[in-house]
Amino acid sequence: MGDLTPEACNDQIRMLLRDLPRGTVAELTDFAVAYWDGRRVVYAYLRDDCPEQIEEEFDLSDCVWLDLRPEFAAWIAAPRFSVRDEVMNWLKDTPPYEEA
């Protein structure tokens, strides 16, 4: 997957997450996750001092894509998912998004 682009990576992650139960999180690396918020894939860094919690969101287009590409390619080859209480709590009160 040497030619993996941020767009292709996002498309693959979106396709997988949309088909999984609401609140499922893609465990992309030891320090980054992604989840489907009903409209888009949200990427987030995990806290250094508490990796069970999310630190902040990031965008694939402005992160260091060349540094992350090998880890994201490895994830696409062997996806890992989990359910995080924090994400479930964020999403529980939001209505599902339905495309027009």
Image: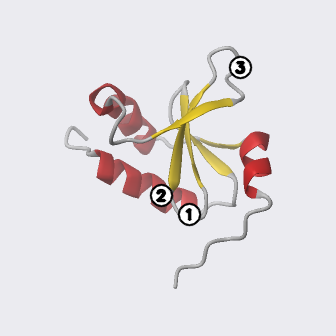
Inspect the image, locate mark 3, and give the three-letter code of the amino acid beneath it: Cys
Q: Are marks 3 and 2 in contact (CB under 8 Å)?
A: no
SS class, disc 1: helix
> Up-down: is 21 above or below 61?
below
Inspect the image, locate mark 2, and give the three-letter code of the amino acid beneath it: Arg
User: Looking at the picture, how far across and down is residue 85, in whole percent?
Assistant: 79, 42
Q: Earlier in the sequence, mark 3 or mark 2?
A: 2
Q: Which residue is mark 3?
A: 50
Q: CA distance from mark 1 to mark 2?
A: 6 Å
Q: Residue furthest bottom?
A: 100
Callout 1: 10 Å neighbours few (<14), some, many (20+)? some
SS class, disc 3: loop
Callout 2: 10 Å neighbours few (<14), some, many (20+)? some
Q: Which mark is residue 26?
A: none
User: Looking at the picture, how far across and down is residue 30, in whole percent?
Assistant: 55, 24
SS class, disc 2: helix
Image quadrant in which you'd find residue 48: top right
Callout 3: 10 Å neighbours few (<14), some, many (20+)? few
> Up-down: is 99 above or below 90?
below
Q: CA distance from mark 3 to mark 2?
A: 26 Å
Q: Which residue is mark 2?
A: 14
Q: Nearer the viewer, mark 3 or mark 1?
A: 3
Q: CA distance from mark 3 to mark 1?
A: 27 Å
In-front residue for pair 51/59: 59
Q: Say left or right for 81 vs 63.
A: right
> Up-down: is 30 above or below 98?
above
Inspect the image, locate mark 1, and give the three-letter code of the amino acid beneath it: Arg
The residue depicted at 58 percent of the width and 33 percent of the height is 56
Q: Which mark is residue 18?
A: 1
Q: Are marks 1 and 2 in contact (CB under 8 Å)?
A: yes
